[in-house]
Image (cartoon, rainbow, N blue to C red):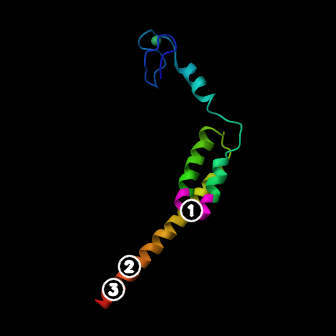
């Protein structure tokens, strides 16, 4: 972040500007969080939840983004739906991986039996 008074770059953990001594912490917290919040619905959580049924990995990624946005932008809205999308997407991904491993080992055994 930058000092509001002199414009010097200061670490985020600093409470005062090391150059001019201007207090910075409270001001940057107010300005950093105010424009990010939204009163709208977390539509990404709904999209991620639906996608997780059809495209496990894509739904998983979208739901993870939606969960992050639910915490940071939407004041917790859509959090449950995003978690549900992550859980469904994760289970489906594991099932797909297990099926692939099963078929690979099945055909590997089959071909080694023939050869
Ligand atoms: Zn300064």
Q: How far apart are the two marked residues, 1 and 3, measured between alpha carbons? A: 31 Å
**Residue located 65% across and 59% down the image:** 50
Question: Ligand 1: does it lie within 8 Å of the C-beta at label 2?
Answer: no
Question: Ligand 1: does it lie within 8 Å of the C-beta at label 3?
Answer: no
Residue 73, horizontal then vertical, whole percent: 62, 38
Q: How far apart are the two marked residues, 2 and 3, measured between alpha carbons? A: 10 Å
What is the quadrant of residue 58 in the picture?
bottom right
Q: Does dot 1 land on a helix, a strand or a loop?
A: loop
For label 3, the residue is 111
Please report the bounds of the magenta region as a residue range. Answer: 51-58
Q: How far apart are the two marked residues, 2 and 1, measured between alpha carbons? A: 24 Å
Q: Quadrant of the C terminus?
A: bottom left
Q: Are marks 2 and 3 in contact (CB under 8 Å)?
A: no
Residue depth check, mark 2 versus mark 1: number of the one nearer the observer: 1
Q: Earlier in the sequence, mark 1 or mark 3?
A: 1
What is the quadrant of residue 27 in the picture?
top right
For label 1, the residue is 55
| Residue 105: mark in rendering | 2
Q: Residue furthest top?
A: 20
Q: Are marks 2 and 1 in contact (CB under 8 Å)?
A: no
**Residue located 44% across and 73% down the image:** 100
Vertical arrangement, residue 65 with respect to residue 84, above or below: above
Magenta stretch, main secondary structure class: helix
Q: Does dot 3 land on a helix, a strand or a loop?
A: helix
Residue 38 visible, this orientation? yes
* Horizontal arrangement in the rendering, residue 21 relative to residue 76 (left or right): left
Q: Earlier in the sequence, mark 2 or mark 3?
A: 2
Residue depth check, mark 2 versus mark 3: number of the one nearer the observer: 3
Residue 84 visible, this orientation? no
Q: Are marks 1 and 3 in contact (CB under 8 Å)?
A: no
- Foreground of the two, 26 or 78: 78
- Foreground of the two, 29 or 99: 99
């Amino acid at each position: 972040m930058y000092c509001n008074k002199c414009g010097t770059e200061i670490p985020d953990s600093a409470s005062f500007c090391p150059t001019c001594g201007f207090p910075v912490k409270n001001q940057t917290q107010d300005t950093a969080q105010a424009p990010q919040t939204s009163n709208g619905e977390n539509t990404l959580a709904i999209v991620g939840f639906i996608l997780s049924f059809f495209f496990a990995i894509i739904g998983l990624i979208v739901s993870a983004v939606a969960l992050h946005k639910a915490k940071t932008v939407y004041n917790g809205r859509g959090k449950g739906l995003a978690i549900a999308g992550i859980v469904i997407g994760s289970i489906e991904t594991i099932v797909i991986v297990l099926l692939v491993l099963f078929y690979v080992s099945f055909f590997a055994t089959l071909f080694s039996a023939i050869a």
